Image (tube, rainbow, N blue to C red):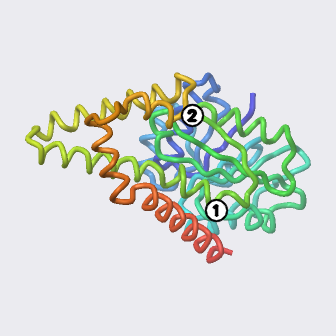
Amino acid sequence: MTRIAVIGGGKIGEALISGLLQGGHATRDLVVAEQYEPRAAELASTYSIRVTTIADAADGADVIVIAVKPADVESVMAVLATVDLDGEQEQVLVSLAAGIPTVRYEVKLPAGFPVVRVMPNTPMLVGLGASVIAPGRHVKPEHLDLVRGILATVGTVSIVPESQIDAVTAVSGSGPAYFFLTVEAMVDAGVALGLTRATATELVVQTMVGSAAMLAQSGESATELRAAVTSPGGTTAAALRELERNGLRSAFHDALAAARNRSAELGAASE
């Protein structure tokens, strides 16, 4: 079985570990590197996996997953430079660190080493993430298949060219925050209309969950499902008219464009 080393035992790293184990990956073929001792002990106790140093975890691993904060990538790569890595042996480096282009890893790794960049999002913590992968210059189809299979344990997986990663960041990477803000606004509106906060929260959350399930399972588009709920001259039509009047669509367009532009700025600053 593929030996996977997860460098970084934070929430995203833990989500991947949990998904892999639930998907049947053998404990003996999964190792994590975590320097903070209390967290390392917690991971070892919770998942019965080996927690070790970066160099030890990467040595002999088929897949090395970088799941640290962007600011910590340089120190991780400095350690990996001391490990006998060999891209010709089909080792793969997978980066979950936001804003770090594949070329930044490639120049520090042995010639031809395959690097796959991933933009995950936080719902992977509950096994429902939307991960997008972008191949580096030396990635082969079998590498993409391998990484897709790993990430499929924590949600859906799409493949895009790296030039589209900034747009992906705007749509799905930052997307959960837009959703949570929408829920917050609807709950506050419900309270203003006389509902208790507990009741408004329960109604909004379940409405969101059910609506997402309908969209995922029905085969109909969001436009079709919205139209089916909107009776001419009815309550929904009145609400939608106000949302359109207040520029909902243009607000989302401008917000996602701003997120994309900021992602590009951060990526350029990291080079």
Q: Which mark is residue 155?
A: 2
Q: Which mark is residue 88?
A: none
Q: In which quadrant of the rendered view does residue 235 lie?
A: top left
Q: Residues within 10 Å of mark 1 (few under 14, many from 20)?
A: some
- Front residue of 98/193: it is 193
Q: In which quadrant of the rendered view does residue 51 lie?
A: top right
Q: Give me the residue at 54% from left, 45% from top.
A: 13
Q: CA distance from mark 1 to mark 2?
A: 26 Å
- Residue 248 in the image: above or below residue 154: below
Q: Which mark is residue 76?
A: 1
Side of 158 where 199 appears, left or right: left
Q: Residue furthest bottom?
A: 269
Side of 223 where 233 appears, left or right: left
Q: Give the image location of residue 46, x and y in percent.
A: 44, 33
As shown in the figure, which amino acid type bears the numbered disc 2?
A: Gly
Image quadrant containing the C terminus: bottom right
- Front residue of 264/46: it is 264
Q: Give me the residue at 43% from left, 34% from top.
A: 226
- Front residue of 187/66: it is 187
User: Is label 1 in contact with label 2 (beta carbons under 8 Å)?
Assistant: no
Mark 1 and mark 2 lie on one chain; the one further toward the N terminus is 1
Pair 1/2: label in front? 2
As shown in the figure, which amino acid type bears the numbered disc 1?
A: Val
Q: Residues within 10 Å of mark 2 (few under 14, many from 20)?
A: some
Label 2 residue SS = strand
Can residue 53 be seen here? The reply is no
Q: Give the image location of residue 189, x and y in percent.
A: 19, 47
Q: Give me the residue at 65% from left, 50% from top.
A: 118
